[in-house]
Amino acid sequence: MPEFSFEQPIEQLEKRKGGYFYLTVDKTVVDQFDKKKSVRLKCEIDNVVSYSCGLNHLGDGNFFIIVATKYLRRLKKELGDNVQFKIYEDPNPLGVEEPEVLLVLLDQDPNAKTIYGRLTDGKKRSLIYTIKRIKSVDTQVSKILQFLEVEGAKAAN
């Protein structure tokens, strides 16, 4: 599994493009991953911060990784400051842990498991992030079933 290390300044997109802080990843690096631009990555910055991330198009053929403001605070860095970072393929292709409530539901409901299995990784992440914000297990189950019902209906059409 390839691993790449870099040193570069933290940059920021224009406000009309989201205003995100980011680190650039050259296309030649991205091309060395099996899944190319669809790869899920782990990014480690200054041996302090580690997180799962995806690649975004920069618009010039290269890519970028978003660096959340909370990570900049933890690093005590700001726009223009240099950082050391490394990237490598995330061993978890979703880049996020599946909540226990989801796993139990999928074990108990073969139809839900089939629909979930057909979802793209992006749709799975979307569902996971949605249910992680919900505290009530009953509401989580309801939201999962609702989401899978909608996705199952889309697939049937």
Image (tube, rainbow, N blue to C red):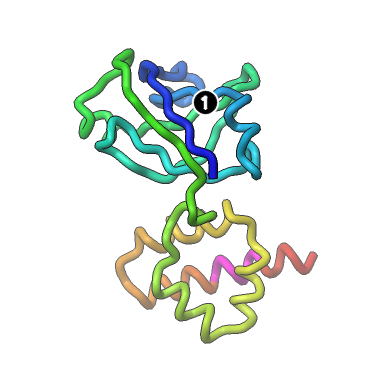
Instruction: Label 1, secondary structure: give it.
Output: strand
Q: Residue at x 35, y 64 (%)?
A: 134
Q: Residue at x 63, y 17 (%)?
A: 60
Q: Residue at x 77, y 69 (%)?
A: 156
**Is 14 part of what is drawn in magenta?**
no
Q: Residue at x 62, y 71 (%)?
A: 149
Quarter location, residue 96: bottom left
Highlighted magenta segment, given as a residue range: 146-151
- Farthest right residue in view: 157
**Is 150 part of what is drawn in magenta?**
yes
Q: Is residue 51 above or below residue 27?
A: below
Q: Is residue 137 above or below residue 60?
A: below
* Most frequent secondary structure within the magenta stretch: helix
> Which residue is labeled 1 in the image?
25
Give x and y (percent) for residue 4. Answer: 48, 32
Between 13 and 28, which is closer to the camera in this rendering?
28
- In the rendered view of the protein, which quadrant contains the N terminus? top right
Q: As drawn, is 65 to the left or to the right of 73?
A: right
Quarter location, residue 147: bottom right
- Kind of residue indicated by mark 1: Val
Give x and y (percent) for residue 92. Answer: 49, 56
